[in-house]
Image (tube, coloured by chain):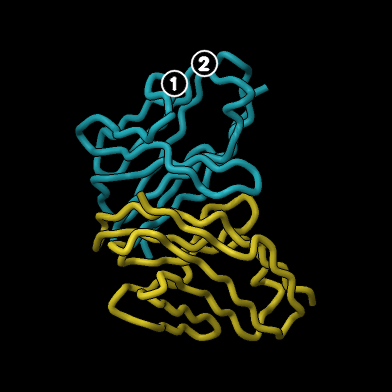
Chain colours: A yellow, B cyan
Amino acid sequence: GENVEQHPSTLSVQEGDSAVIKCTYSDSASNYFPWYKQELGKGPQLIIDIRSNVGEKKDQRIAVTLNKTAKHFSLHITETQPEDSAVYFCAASYGSGGSYIPTFGRGTSLIVHP
Amino acid sequence: GAVVSQHPSWVICKSGTSVKIECRSLDFQATTMFWYRQFPKQSLMLMATSNEGSKATYEQGVEKDKFLINHASLTLSTLTVTSAHPEDSSFYICSANGDEQFFGPGTRLTVL
């Protein structure tokens, strides 16, 4: 099965700095890579995703890159704000539309200091 | 965007009792829903896949007789934790796949 490794487990930055979270996956058949933000006591929320036919995707301050050859993908948050503080999970899965079950990384606790 | 709700948001029960958690897709139909369990500071662990009109598919190591799943309609799946024990205390999260996977807000179960 798929195995997703995520680093770092904890990331502490100053407000305005950039934050980068990296993940690797093992199954070359995986073709969908979502990122989730989970605030304390809440369910995960999808913040950005990327499919294997794309190398990079950006949405305002958030960007994700994918290297299929190396089987790794990264989340980049620029101009971090205190409200970005949360646990971020990467995931990898195979499938399209609603037919996929993601394998999650272990999560990164991002702390943005004002 | 699509919304998935869970009820209750938290529950405290005595050891040995059963607890039912509901998961609803509010504005789309979901033939498949998923149940996850999350312990503090850990990732989401898939427990089972809930299929409308058929039996759930359980992940290895998850007791199907302890965690009963019913998916009676295209918008509702329920998870019943039977004979709950303190080690079942956890954060239970459901999800449903529309165009993407939408997660519910979670249910905090505390078994005394």
* Number of on-image labels: 2
> Disc 1 sits on a residue from what chain?
B
B93 w.r.t. A3: above or below? above
**Quadrant of the frame with the C terminus of chain B:** top right
B60 sits to left or right of B31: right
Residue reaching furthest to the front: A70
B15 w.r.t. B25: above or below? above
B88 w.r.t. B26: above or below? above
- Residue corresponding to mark 2: B83
> Disc 2 sits on a residue from what chain?
B
Spot occupied by residue B12 in the image (x, y as percentages of width and height): 63, 28
Say which element carries label 2: loop
A18 sits to left or right of B65: right
Q: How crowded is the residue under tag 1: few (<14 C-alpha within 10 Å), some, or many (20+)?
A: some
Can you tell which quarter of the image residue B97 is in?
bottom left
Say which element carries label 1: loop
* Discs 1, 2 touching: Cβ within 8 Å: yes
Q: Which residue lies at the image location 28% right of the left edge and 78% below the top edge?
A: A53
Q: Which residue lies at the image location 46% right of the left edge and 83% below the top edge?
A: A59
Q: Which residue lies at the image location 38% right of the left edge and 53% below the top edge?
A: A2
- Residue corresponding to mark 1: B66
Q: Which residue lies at the image location 40% right of the left edge and 69% below the top edge?
A: A71
